[in-house]
Image: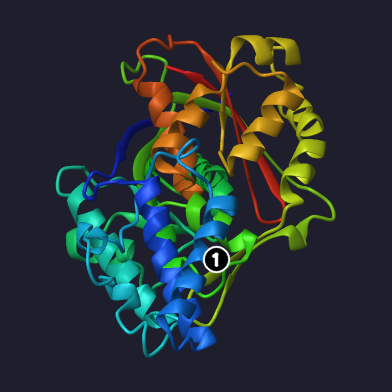
């Protein structure tokens, strides 16, 4: 049976990650400023009351440092954390005249510039593959930054786009890569890079202080990662993950509970409190179908495998762990990436895979089961083995 081999993972080190506590405090200031503008406050006392209200709501609903210690926010710099008058980033430079922040067009220009810089950094030293699958849900430009990169560097590398599958997008992206590698209509396609470019910080909504928005504001971070898919060759000496099966399933009746749509200024996420419940009810049946033709029983997978689960949020990881009876050890890489990066949408799962590959304590031959969820509600699963 033909299998796909994932290797050569590279994450982005161009920007520092900021402490969760500092980011939550900074966005509390932005939220409070906008609320004062919306409410047309006219005194220092009124402004202080707004700040206190927002601060209490952030403390109550936002994801705290006990779950996430650091996140990347490419639109923020150290300058914004300085004491004194509020230092506004480019995204919110006209905040006092337009409390919506930058327009969608301006945000996409920022996305294009940031992704172009990332790609130039990566491919200054990385060999161009036969094809690149570009994965993102946070930006759009046509031609894309990847297409522009190829137009200046080579004519033989193809570009395939995997857009707007959100948190589970690595799975359809790998399906696309497999289709390129094993397609009889394509000749000599042996190497496909998958490039994830997610800038969630572009889409923080500082206009409302609903519990849902405060969770989103504090959960998501920026993430960039590149890795390679090739036809698995048992003689390879490279470290990586061998993919043997991918499954995708849309949970019935759940579509309205997770959405990612274009708003007037930013992309807007809908994430209702019912999402964890849908996943909780569907997960056991989905996993049983995923592993049904494997050589391991459910008990074997639970006790003798690593579970690389997309950390949509702490509650989702907790519910899955308890529902399936998984140990802290089997899920430690999911919790580790959540703590170190937050939820980076499609880039999160590849970060977890990289952590497994890089850990020499995980032996070759270790089975890995990977799960992710996104709008639809869509559940995706993959069976792998560490090489």
Q: Is residue 218 visible?
A: yes
Total marks shown come to 1
User: Relative to 359, is 289 on the left or the right?
Assistant: right
User: Callout 1: few (<14), some (14-19), or many (20+) C-alpha neighbours within 10 Å?
Assistant: few
Residue name at image x 69 percent, y 31 percent: 320
297 lies above or below 63: above
Q: Quadrant of residue 340?
A: top left
Q: Nearer the viewer, residue 308 or 318?
A: 318
Image location (x, y in percent) of residue 70: 37, 42
Residue 154 appears in the picture as rendered: no
- Give the percent coordinates (x, y) of residue 89: 28, 70
Q: Mark 1 highlights which residue? A: 53
Q: Residue furthest front?
A: 45
Q: Quadrant of the N terminus?
A: top right
Element marked by disc 1: helix
Quarter of the image with the C terminus is top left
Please indicate whether residue 129 sits to the left or right of residue 142 in the image: left
Rendering coords of residue 53 (x, y %): 55, 66
Q: How is the image coloured?
A: rainbow
* Residue 116 drawn at (x, y percent): 25, 62
Q: Is residue 34 left or right of residue 224?
A: right
Q: Nearer the viewer, residue 229 or 64?
A: 64
Residue drawn at (72%, 18%) of the image = 325
């Amino acid at each position: 049976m033909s299998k796909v081999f994932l290797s050569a993972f590279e994450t982005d080190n161009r920007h520092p990650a900021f402490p969760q506590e500092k980011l939550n405090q900074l966005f509390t200031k932005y939220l409070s400023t906008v609320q004062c503008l919306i409410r047309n406050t006219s005194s220092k006392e009124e402004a202080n009351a707004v700040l206190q209200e927002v601060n209490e709501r952030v403390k109550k609903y936002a994801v705290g440092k006990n779950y996430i210690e650091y996140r990347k926010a490419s639109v923020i710099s150290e300058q914004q954390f300085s004491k004194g008058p509020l230092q506004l980033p480019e995204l919110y430079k006209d905040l006092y005249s337009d409390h919506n922040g930058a327009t969608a067009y301006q945000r996409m220009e920022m996305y294009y510039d940031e992704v172009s810089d990332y790609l130039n950094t990566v491919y200054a030293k990385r060999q161009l593959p036969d094809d690149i699958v570009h994965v993102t849900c946070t930006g759009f430009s046509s031609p894309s930054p990847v297409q522009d990169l190829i137009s200046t560097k080579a004519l033989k590398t193809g570009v395939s786009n995997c857009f707007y599958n959100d948190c589970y997008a690595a799975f359809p992206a790998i399906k696309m890569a497999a289709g390129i590698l094993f397609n009889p209509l394509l000749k000599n396609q042996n190497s496909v890079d998958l490039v994830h470019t997610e800038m969630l910080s572009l889409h923080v909504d500082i206009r409302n202080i609903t519990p849902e928005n405060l969770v989103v504001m504090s959960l998501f971070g920026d993430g960039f990662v590149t890795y390679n898919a090739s036809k698995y060759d048992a003689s390879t000496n490279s470290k990586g993950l061998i993919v043997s099966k991918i499954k995708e399933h849309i949970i019935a009746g759940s579509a309205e509970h997770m959405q990612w749509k274009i708003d007037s200024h930013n992309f807007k996420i809908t994430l209702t409190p019912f999402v964890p419940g849908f996943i909780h009810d569907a997960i056991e049946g989905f996993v049983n179908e995923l592993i049904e033709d494997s050589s391991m029983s459910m008990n074997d997978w639970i006790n003798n495998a690593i579970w690389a689960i997309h950390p949509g949020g702490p509650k989702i990881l907790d519910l899955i762990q308890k529902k399936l009876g998984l140990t802290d050890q089997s899920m430690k890489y999911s919790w580790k990436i959540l703590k170190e990066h937050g939820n980076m949408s499609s880039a999160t799962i590849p970060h977890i895979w990289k952590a497994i590959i890089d850990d020499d304590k995980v032996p070759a031959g270790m089975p890995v089961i990977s799960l992710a969820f996104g709008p639809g509600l869509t559940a995706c699963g993959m069976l792998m083995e560490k090489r």
